[in-house]
Amino acid sequence: MSMYQKMTELLKTTAYWEIPIQPGVVWDLRSGGAILSGTTGSGKSWLSLFIIIIAAIKDNILLLGDPKISDLSTLSDFMPPGNVTWQPSDICSMVENAVNIMMQRYAYMKNERLQKNLFQADFADFGYPVVLVMIDELAAFISSLDKKSRDSFEANIKRLTLQGRQSGVILCSILQNPSTTNISTESRSQAAFRVYLGQSGGIEYRMLFGEGYTYPKRIYRPGEGLYMLAGKTMKPELIQTPRLDKSQLQETLKKALKSQYDRNPLNKF
Ligand SMILES: Nc1ncnc2c1ncn2[C@@H]1O[C@H](COP(=O)(O)OP(=O)(O)OP(=O)(O)O)[C@@H](O)[C@H]1O
Ligand SMILES: [Mg+2]
C-alpha cells in the first residue's frame, strides 16, 4: 500500500477537524492552534508536512507562508497561487486574507446563531472546512519587517490567535526558539498543541510549556520531543512524530494537495 493510501485509510475513523499525530495523540483543530518548535534538524518541517498531508486529505484549506524559502515553498507547484507565499508582502497579504475569511465567517455565524438559537456553535457545526495557516519561522519573519508592516502583520496574527478558533481559521506557527521575544505569552497560552522537538537546555521548555515541570534526561532523535495538548495532558509528554518515507513524500503531497484547487473558504462541505 502506498503512503498516501495508508494515510487515507488511517484517517477514516477521525473527523475532518482532527489531526492524529500518534496513537492517543490527536490535535483537535476545534480546540485551537499549534506551536511547533525545536532545534535545527529536529523534525519541525517533517511534522509540518505530515500535518499538511492529513489536513489536505481531509479537504481542509491550507495557507502556507515560508519566509526562509525552504520546505513549504516547494509545495507551490502543487497548490493554487496565493495559498503558498514566501515574499514578505505576499505573506502579509495572505495573513490579511485569512483574517478576512475569519471575519466573514464570523458575521455569517453570528447571524445564523441568532436566528436559529445555536448557542456557541462553531465552524464545524456550520460545516466549514478548517483554514490552516501555517507559517515557518514566524518570529524571524516578524522581526525582519519594517515598523509599519510589522504592526499590521502582528495585529493580524493576534486576531487569528485570539479569534480564529471559533471560525476555524487556525494558526500553526513553526519556530526554532520559543522565547518571549519571539512569541507573545498570549499566543502561547492560546495554542492548543505545543511541541518541542530535539534537545533543550531547559529554557525553551519553560518558555513553551510554562514553569513547574521536570523533564526527562534523554537523547531525542529527529522527530522526537515533548508535547502538551490542551485538555488532554497534565504535563509535557513524549512525542514521536510519524516516520515518513522520503521516497514517497513528494508523490503523497502532490496527491493530497489536489484537494486545494478551486476551493472557496466561505463554502461549506
Ligand atoms: N518523523 C521523521 N521521520 C523520519 N525522519 C525524520 C523525521 N523527522 C525528521 N526526520 C529527519 O530529520 C531531518 C531534518 O528534519 P527537518 O527538516 O524536519 O528539521 P527542522 O526542524 O525543520 O530543521 P530546520 O530548523 O533547520 O528547518 C529530515 O530531513 C529527516 O531526514
Ligand atoms: Mg525546517
Image (cartoon, grey):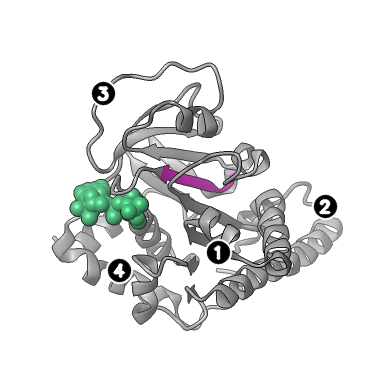
Instruction: Please give the residue where the numbered disc 4 appears in the rendered image.
Output: 253
Q: What kind of element bears circle 4?
A: helix
Q: What kind of element bears circle 3?
A: loop
Identify which amino acid the numbered label 3 is placed on. Arg
Q: What kind of element bears circle 1?
A: loop
**1 vs 3, front mark:** 3
Which quadrant: the N terminus?
bottom left
Magenta-drawn stretch, dominant element (helix, strand or loop): strand
Is 250 placed left or right of 114 in the picture? left
Disc 3: CA contacts within 10 A as few (<14), some (14-19) or many (>=20): few
Instruction: Please give the residue where the numbered disc 3 appears in the rendered image.
Output: 218
**1 vs 2, front mark:** 1
Classify the position of ligand 2 by quadrant: top left, top right, bottom left or bottom right.
bottom left
Residue at image location 38% in from the left, 55% down from the top:
48
Identify which amino acid the numbered label 2 is placed on. Asn
Q: Nearer the viewer, residue 210 or 172?
A: 210
Mark closest to the chain's N terminus, 2 or 3 = 2
Instruction: Please give the residue where the numbered disc 2 appears in the rendered image.
Output: 117
Q: What kind of element bears circle 2?
A: loop
Cβ of disc 4 within 8 Å of ligand 1? no
Dots 1, 4 in contact, CB < 8 A: no
Tell me where the magenta segment starts and ends, as one range: 32-37
Mark closest to the chain's N terminus, 3 or 4 = 3
Is 224 placed left or right of 152 in the picture? left
Disc 2: CA contacts within 10 A as few (<14), some (14-19) or many (>=20): few
The answer to which image quadrant residue 238 occupies is top left
Spatial separation of the CA atoms under disc 3 and disc 4: 32 Å
Mark closest to the chain's N terminus, 2 or 4 = 2
**Residue 106 screen position, x and y as percent:** 75, 62
Instruction: Please give the residue where the numbered disc 1 appears in the rendered image.
Output: 129
The answer to which image quadrant residue 25 occupies is top left
Is 219 placed left or right of 114 in the picture? left
